[in-house]
Amino acid sequence: MAGSGSRTSHARGGRHVKKGRSSPGIIILAVIFLALIALLAVFISSRAGNGIVYKTNTLEAGDVILMPEMFLKDASKPIAFDPNFDPSEIDTRTPGSYVVKLVSGKRRLTADLVIEDTIPPTAEARPVTTQVGVPVKAEALVKNVADNSYVFSVAYETEPDFDKAGTYNVNILIRDAGGNFASVPSVLTVSEAADPVSGPVEDQPAPDTEPPVIYGVHDITIYVGEGISYFSGVYAEDGVDGKVAVDVDADSVNTKAAGKYTITYFATDSAGNRAEKAAKVTVLVRSVKEEEVAALAKSVISKIITSDMTGYEKISAIYKWVRSNVSWYDSSDKDDWVKAAYQGLHDGKGDCFVYQMVSKVLLDEAGIENKLIDTVPLRYLHCWNLVNIGEGWYHFDTTPRKGGFDGFYLDDETLMAYSETHKNSHIYDHEKYPDAVISRPKS
């Protein structure tokens, strides 16, 4: 009876297929397919910032200071530029597509910035008189040229005849970086001349007496021992010269002593006009206790380490966490390991000393034997860690490097091979530290 029932069920299944109905197998496949689509949607959503930032942002070209809040979609979330991203490197007057890096808490996000120029240039006519045989450039017949981006070309719509006296109504075509055109009607007079002349006779422009304008200057607050990025978001433009260089007088600032300091930005155009703008730098003393660092380390370890992990799995989890949650920032208080560890765990940024100390406190909290190691100071000083999970000592360097570098669980030979091809990046006194000589395949 059971066998007969089984055959009858298969026969009904066949009839169902012929009638265009879904068999149980097809239904299961459809459910799996829809589940995969849902997972893909979640993945795409997470890549887009999970609703925190707009994935694509369109901005009209012009003098705009980029602020992280411009990209924020969820106003309840914190937002800041990634420490490794300098918004001042994006020229908001140049149309194009750019990638903006942001952080929201411990999450690193990216947003696409599209700068477009849809507004044509503007200018005023400037009548010019010249003599027969003396050409005049199209730029001379317009004044007060302005545009949200940059003017690429100024040309005659139709070239006038400079060998024939007369008054010509000419159109001057002005094209900007966005491909927009403006046509400005002007008047060119070509006169007879008894004596040859060397150039056009025209109204001379007024001397340039206006200084540049400096944008983006703001007060700065740091902690003792940190570095300062003086020019983040700061630039200057001049009505005649366009963008001009900005410099800063910051000789009074002592980043190793708490206090308030005045700095002065200045920019000078080709006519010698100088603009100045002052700002304040406040240097604070960061008071951090070892207990605070220990609490932060304990919180991290509780999230990434489980009791059933092997030693290798534990150090792998620590390495991945440090590389994913601490960004390179060329500053730290080299005289205080507690502050350095706090800077990395709390602020999520720092130099190799910060990476070394964050790694140390996490390894300590996880019960992993470790040592501190640093280079012989040749071109610069670099520091990292050694770990021992019962297989001997291995190098454990969490600091990221340009061009990519995997400093996880390296033996001496592998690390020295890398160092030799990267400007002796890891030259150290081998007699001061235990050997890491056993090559272990990464799993």
Image (cartoon, rainbow, N blue to C red):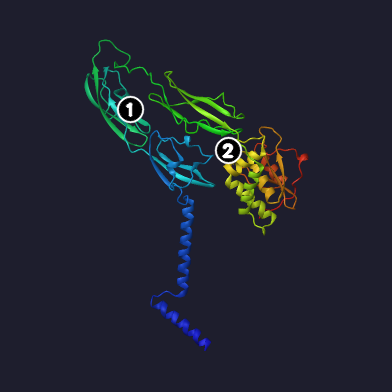
Badge 2 density bin: few <14, some 14–19, many ≥20, Cα 10 Å? some
Mark 2 in CB contact with mark 1 (< 8 angstroms): no
Query: Looking at this view, is 233 or 19 the one in front?
Result: 233
Mark 1 residue element:
strand
On the image, numbered disc 1 is attached to which residue?
145
Which residue in the rendered view is the most extreme toward the top? Answer: 195
Between tags 2 and 1, which lies in front?
2
Give x and y (percent) for residue 287. Answer: 62, 37
Does residue 250 appear in the picture of this structure? yes
On the image, numbered disc 2 is attached to which residue?
329
The amino acid pointed to by label 1 is: Val
Look at 43% across and 44% down and name the residue there: 71
Give x and y (percent) for residue 407. Answer: 65, 46
Does residue 397 appear in the picture of this structure? no
The amino acid pointed to by label 2 is: Tyr
Look at 76% across and 40% down and name the residue there: 430
**Image height of 35 relative to 417, above or below:** below
